[in-house]
Amino acid sequence: MLKSSKIILKKTNNEKYPFGIILGSGIKNFFEKKEIKFSISYKNLPEFPKPTIKGHSGKIVFGSVYKKKIACLYGRSHIYEGHTPNKLANPIRVLKEIGCQTLVITNAAGSLNKKMSSGSLMLISDHINWSGFNPLIGPNDDNYGTRFPDMSDAYNLDLRQKMHKASKIGKIPLYKGVYTMYSGPNFETPAEIKALRVIGGDAVGMSTVPEVIVANHCGIKTVAISLITNFAAGLSKNKLSHEETLREAQKGEKNIVKLIKIFLKVFF
Ligand code: HPA
């Protein structure tokens, strides 16, 4: 067991947290104050890579919503920050070790589809790992999973169906599509975006894929939602910036949090 897991379980008196959530760029909050039990800074969790960029606060917040116990990662690390890809596995493995069975991942992403504008939510049906990296490269730890994990239901179908139902209940429009991961840190070129559209992408971003791979490897059921913050390069005349990502994500935060809370309330 990782040291970070032991630290957390000591604090929870071995109480398990069956739900995990990861907040993407610019999504600052999931819990209301009264829902929070306690939080731990990543600084106090030895195996956690420390986020270095704006919009990612770097703490794990433990709370309860509709009596479901949730461990929520406020902020994540990315490959472009220089972390070795397999270090990104640690937070997911810690979630597993503290009881996570269902993981909801969020991210900010660029749209490859002219109909899907800023503020839209897209349920990820599958991904294309175009990043050139994989967090499982290296010796396999059989304690977590098999050497060659299956990815044919990486975005769990049952959870996706539930999320679509939750979107109907909440009257929150929810697109679906394929997420393509690019390593960053620069935004893509218009030619790269053209290529991603040709190979079947609907959105592009610089996260999520490593987490989904690791979660599936260790048997956590996973579902993921992109919050669209811009049209990808070449699809509009605007220049892309991280400031725009944060600003637009902030506008969509309410909707994505509401959707996840309905999902938790109705189906668990
Ligand atoms: N490209 C990559 N990552 C992103 C984008 C984008 O256009 N928007 C938000 N994250």
Image: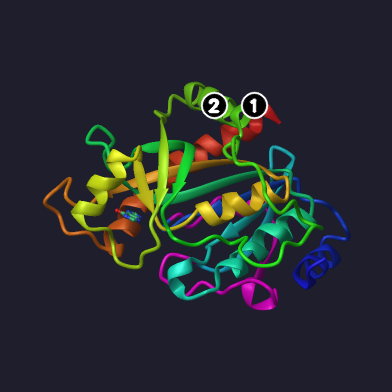
Can residue 31 be seen here? The reply is no
Can residue 132 be seen here? The reply is yes
Q: Amino acid at mark 2?
A: Ala
- Disc count in the image? 2
Specify few, some or many for label 2: CA neighbours under 10 Å numbering under 14, 14-19, or 20 or more.
many
Q: Is residue 103 above or below residue 137?
A: above
Q: Nearer the viewer, residue 145 or 253?
A: 145
Verify whether residue 210 appears in magenta.
no
Residue 241, image x and y in percent?
25, 63
- Closer to the N terminus: mark 1 or mark 2? 2
State if disc 2 and disc 1 touch (CB < 8 Å). yes
Specify few, some or many for label 1: CA neighbours under 10 Å numbering under 14, 14-19, or 20 or more.
few
Q: Is residue 212 above or below residue 240?
A: above
The color scheme shown is rainbow
Q: State whether the magenta stretch is mostly helix, strand or loop.
A: loop
Query: Residue at image x 40%, y 45%?
Result: 227
Is the C terminus in the top left, top right, bottom left or bottom right quadrant? top right
Image side of residue 110 versus residue 56, left or right: left
Residue stretch rendered in magenta on the structure: 27-56
Residue indicated by mark 1 = 266
Residue 44, image x and y in percent?
69, 77
Verify whether residue 48 appears in magenta.
yes
Residue indicated by mark 2 = 166
Assess mark 1: CB under 8 A from ligand 1? no
Q: Nearer the viewer, residue 137 or 75?
A: 137
Residue 52, image x and y in percent?
47, 75
Query: Residue at image x 43%, y 39%?
Result: 255
